[in-house]
Amino acid sequence: MQVKIDTREKFTVITPDTDVLSDNLTAELSSVIVQYLQNNPKNVVLNLKNVSTVDALAAERLVKLQQQFYESSASFVICEIQNNLEKKLEELELLDLMNITPSESEAWDIVQMEEIERELLDGDDMDFNKMDGDKD
């Protein structure tokens, strides 16, 4: 599978050069993308601007890939999907499970917000239970 890879400061954009994402192609794509969990930056934006359709197994694989990234404290955002691809994901009842933005710029915003959220949640600056105890 041909893909364009563009590494930025906080994420890598991967753009498949195909109009159909089959399960086999998505398996190949997943093996490429998963490697980024070992790199810095480990956040990935998957730009699907060239993809017009996806089969059910491929779509499910993308959802699992996104979950794998979030379990590893990394962002996985899909952007620039075409209308017919969006309809297909809606039919498969997977659209709401995916982190999708209309543009690459908005995907960048999501990655930044999730980075801040992870920093705040990982910080031990406040002990909320202790604060609640002080009120009594």
Image (tube, rainbow, N blue to C red):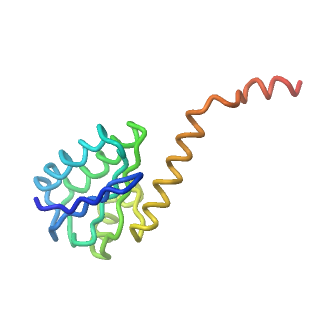
85 vs 127: above or below: below
In front of the other: 11 or 87: 11
How many numbered discs sit on the rendered protein? Answer: 0
Q: Residue 108 placed where, x, y %?
A: 44, 60
Which residue: 28% across, 75% down? 84
Q: Residue 97 placed where, x, y %?
A: 39, 54
In front of the other: 20 or 126: 126
Q: Residue 77 placed where, x, y %?
A: 38, 56
Q: Quadrant of the C terminus?
A: top right
Q: Quadrant of the N terminus?
A: bottom left
Give the image quarter of residue 132: top right
Which residue: 22% across, 69% down? 51
Which residue: 50% across, 54% down? 112
In front of the other: 132 or 121: 121
* Most distant residue in the right direction: 136
Q: Classify residue 111 as left or right of residue 6.
A: right
In front of the other: 94 or 23: 23
Q: Residue 8 placed where, x, y %?
A: 36, 57
* Most distant residue in the front direction: 9
Give the image quarter of residue 120: top right
Q: Classify residue 68 as left or right of residue 10.
A: left
Give the image quarter of residue 37: top left
